[in-house]
Image (cartoon, rainbow, N blue to C red):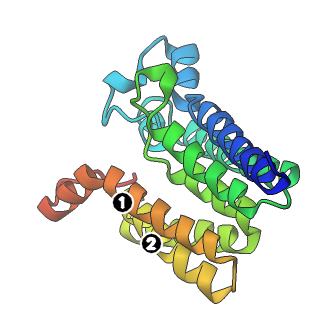
Amino acid sequence: MDINTFNTAMKISYLLQAAALSYIIGSIPTGYLIVKAKTGKDIREIGSGSTGATNVKRVLGKKWFFIVMLLDAIKGALPVIAAKLLYPDIPLAAVIAAIFVIIGHSKPIFLKFKGGKSVASGVGTILALNWQIGLILAVVWSIITYITKYVSVGSIIALILSPFLMFLFKAPFAYVVYCVVAAVYVTYLHRENIKRLIKGEENKVR
């Protein structure tokens, strides 16, 4: 095996490691664990069935909504930060970590692949890739959600804006591509919310 082939094999190995570890971290069901610990209930059998912060709010109130959102954002950011630190010469590693952590959150191996909608964890990944853009998206989400009273609308709009902001901030092209993928994926996960919005049946933030 020549040196170039060896280096390529090592890079592939690093990317696979980043993907696997990020998926496992993303699969840690924060909302499920907190609701289970405090009430003994399975959050997947309550409200929308999501393990995310919005559904946690239905059970435990506003305080735990923000706590779960923060924990999920941290969960999204950590694997990306680790990938940037461990593999500084492989920019794709951070993007792979970001993709697999949001997949883990929405399709967690520990809960038979039924999780949340990856909004907070997705914003966490973007914060880790570019903290300025992550903060802008958090502000956009807050404003849109406050004005419309719909968490889903704020979430979708914020994620759709992310690739444009990455482009405007001249971020690496791989980051732009990731944000496109994340925006499409999160919008897909909100497909039932979109149907309810169209019918005027979506729940508002109270």
Report the number of discs.
Answer: 2
Query: Residue 84's quadrant in the figure?
Result: bottom right
Tell me the tag on residue 187.
1
> Is 192 rendered above or below residue 46?
below
Q: Nearer the viewer, residue 24 or 13?
A: 13
Is 155 positioned to the left or the right of 24 in the image?
left
Using the image, determine if residue 62 lies above or below residue 144.
Answer: above
Location of residue 64 with respect to 41 vertically, above or below:
below
Q: Which residue is mark 2?
A: 160
Q: Secondary structure at mark 1?
A: helix
The amino acid type found where label 1 is placed reads Thr
Q: Residue at x 56, y 17 (%)?
A: 38
Could you tell which of marks 1 and 2 lies nearer the N-terminus?
2
SS class, disc 2: helix
Q: Nearer the viewer, residue 173 or 111?
A: 173
**Residue 69, x across and y down, in percent:** 59, 45
In contact (CB < 8 Å): disc 1 and disc 2:
yes
Left or right of 12, for residue 58: left
Amino acid at the residue labelled 2: Ile
Q: Is residue 199 visible?
A: yes
